[in-house]
Image (tube, grey):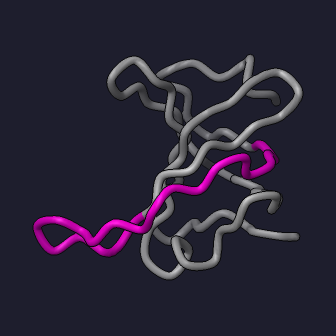
């Protein structure tokens, strides 16, 4: 699967992408854990993804991200790749 194939509402997404951008870590609102917005890419495009908790401190530009059982949503016109609680993506250099 590639970024160009992703559509809102898709579930059980398995994809490996490269981190292209990492924003600033934000403190969670309303008791949420810290999070950071990133953009992941492959040769076909780019998609946003938010990392939560400990992962937001580990993710760095250039890393590979392997998502299993992810899902796709749309927020303010941008596609977002999400992972389910307890099913953290795998990060590698």
Is 63 on the left-hand or right-hand side of 40? right
Q: Nearer the viewer, residue 27 or 90?
A: 27
Residue lying at the far front in this picture: please name it: 24
Q: Please name the residue shown 74% across and 18% down the image.
A: 4
Quadrant (top left/top right/bottom left/bottom right) for the N terminus: top right
User: Is residue 18 found inside the magenta-colored segment of the image?
Assistant: yes
| Residue 93 percent location from the top left of the image | 88, 70
Q: Please name the residue shown 11% across and 67% down the image.
A: 30
Q: Is residue 82 above or below residue 73?
A: below
Q: Is residue 4 above or below residue 10?
A: above
Is 90 on the left-hand or right-hand side of 50? right
| Residue 78 percent location from the top left of the image | 46, 24
Is 75 on the left-hand or right-hand side of 4? left
Q: Please name the residue shown 52% across and 33% down the image.
A: 72
Q: Quadrant of residue 12?
A: top right
Number of callouts: 0
Q: Quadrant of residue 29?
A: bottom left
Q: Please name the residue shown 41% across and 25% down the image.
A: 74
| Residue 38 percent location from the top left of the image | 56, 50
Start-end of magenta stretch = 15-35
User: Is residue 23 found inside the magenta-colored segment of the image?
Assistant: yes
Q: Is residue 5 above or below residue 33?
A: above
| Residue 20 percent location from the top left of the image | 72, 46
């Amino acid at each position: 699967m590639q970024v160009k194939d992703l559509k809102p509402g898709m579930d059980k997404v398995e994809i490996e992408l490269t981190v292209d951008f990492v924003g600033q870590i934000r403190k969670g609102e309303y008791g949420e854990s810290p999070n950071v917005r990133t953009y992941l890419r492959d040769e076909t495009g780019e998609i946003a993804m938010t990392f939560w908790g400990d992962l937001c401190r580990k993710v760095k530009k250039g890393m590979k991200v392997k998502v299993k059982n992810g899902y796709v949503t749309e927020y303010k016109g941008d596609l977002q790749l999400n992972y389910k609680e307890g099913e953290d993506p795998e990060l590698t250099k």
